[in-house]
Amino acid sequence: MRRRTFLGLVPVAGLVTVAGCAPIPSSGPAAQGPPGVFRYAYELTPSRLDPHRASISQDGVTLFPAYDRLVHQSPVGEPEPGLARAWAWEDPLALRLDLRPGVTFHDGTPFDAAAVKANIERAKTVQGSAVRTELDPVASVEVRDALTAVLRLSYPSASLPAVLSDRAGAMVSPKALADGVDLDAVAVGAGMYRMVEHNRGQITRFERHPGYWDPAAAAAEKLEIHHIADAATRLNAVRTGVVDACRVPPALLDQAKQTGLEVSTAGSLNFNYFVLNRARSAFGDLRVRRALNHALDREAIRQGVYRGLATVSAQPFVPGYWAYDPDLGDDAIRFDPDLARRLLAEAGLGDGLRFSTVIPTGSDYQPLAEAIQAQLAAVGVTMEIAPAAPDTMGDLMFVQERYDAMLASWGPRADPSMTVATRYTANGFGNPGGQTTPRLEELHKQALATTDPAARSAVMHDLVDEVVDQVLEIPVVFPEDVVVQSSRVVGLVPRLMHRPEFRGVTVR
């Protein structure tokens, strides 16, 4: 087994046996695919194809091959040149973007500063925008010349280059915007691949865009993303040659190794967590949120559900990452069921608490949900599990606010301020109910205004301490990625942001 880990972030612990997982036979010589076509099985179907309204960051896995961004990310999450070949702060409220010349969208429309202006303005104002909060600092976009755009800010935002490496920086053809093209039906970007088919919940197919500015990025002639929610089915798809690679939970590590395929594990900033709508149920009471934290035996979950291939942290980051506060400790999530019961009684819930939690369908989350359900029941809390299609989760929880809680994974962002803005601020898209604290809002502003790395790290530590103290969410574990691929795959590398990208990936 090949093992790759980022920055030592997620140490491997001892493995435990997970019952109910039948062995998967070894793959044979027939497990081959068509030449020049890289096929990846992904656990999620995008919530929608419109990059500015797609409700979860993981949607970028399917969208970014077609929609290039102004800024790209390295495997360890550092901003890199994309459609903006360079950028610079002219002053704390003006970010200049030097754009790449000779780029065209898939419909033939030239990419230029006017396209940047049209996209940023649209992403800030379109109904249902999922990136409005991230772009809130941008007051206007100046078209200085065809290849120079200047983002004028209403307040400082040191995270803005990183923001532009995610959906907020995805560029749509301005002609498609002007013509009112249904972007949930047709992708019209400037990416390395042109989307030629999207069969929702099944498969998305791409063909190489011959005019792409970085020809080496589109190493495969064609790309297929197979949307398969069930982990065992994904693994079997690689074994039988239906796809070339996939990601599976740690519980399937032994089965993956039995196939004879290449298997690797790597840490990331992705974590499984509870989103609590603090305007529903009893979750507005800090004592209740703290009770849930102390009711969970995360070490038992780490061993029993994740075979030890996970990290437990009270923070939304893990040791080794610059925003993690090494002095905070994990007392806030100490397993203490007696304390959990006392806190519930103090909150007037001595007779129990009942709430509903939506989880993604498929095998990835059901074991975790059932483990948590049993642990909460031991302190008098009844958690009703409501499975829903993964591509509807963001809408159900963040737009419709239909459930009290959601158990899912948080797709990391290229800058921690993006996580803060989305998850914890009053207007954050991923903060149902909008509950926050004045201290968090003030620290968030300080983090955005601070550019010195050491000073910014100190501010982020204070901010993380506030998140943990006020239990603005309940992190469970940071599971490792287990990647399974056939020997014909070339160039697929793990990424700290947990979202596979297919630049330079091909098959032999």
Image (cartoon, helix red, strand yellow):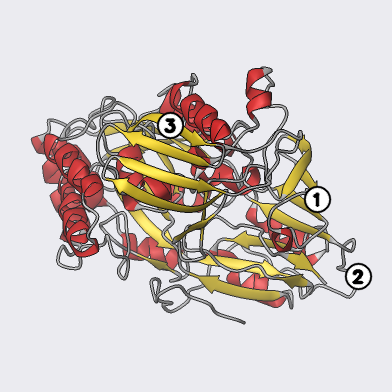
Q: Which residue is mark 3?
A: 142
Q: Which residue is mark 2?
A: 30
What is the C-alpha distance between the residues marked 3 and 1?
31 Å
Q: Is residue 129 in sight in this rendering? A: no
Mark drawn on residue 210: 1
Q: Is residue 482 in sight in this rendering? A: yes
| Residue 224 as seen in the image, left or right of residue 276 | right
Is there CB contact under 8 Å for labels 2 and 3? no
Residue drawn 59% across and 58% down?
500
Q: Amino acid at mark 1?
A: Pro
Residue drawn 77% across and 57% down?
39
| Residue 244 as seen in the image, left or right of residue 343 | right
Instruction: Pinpoint residue 136: horizontal percent, then vertical percent.
Output: 34, 31
Task: Answer above or below: position of 366 versus 432.
Answer: below
User: What is the crowding at mark 3: few (fewer than 14 residues within 10 Å), some, or many (at least 20)?
Assistant: some
Name the mark nearer the viewer: 2 or 3. 3
Residue drawn 27% across and 31% down?
154
Under tag 3, what secondary structure? strand
Under tag 1, what secondary structure? loop
Q: Amino acid at mark 2?
A: Ala
Instruction: Pinpoint residue 202: horizontal percent, then vertical percent.
Output: 75, 41
What is the C-alpha distance between the residues marked 2 and 3?
56 Å
Instruction: Pinpoint residue 38: horizontal percent, then vertical percent.
Output: 78, 59
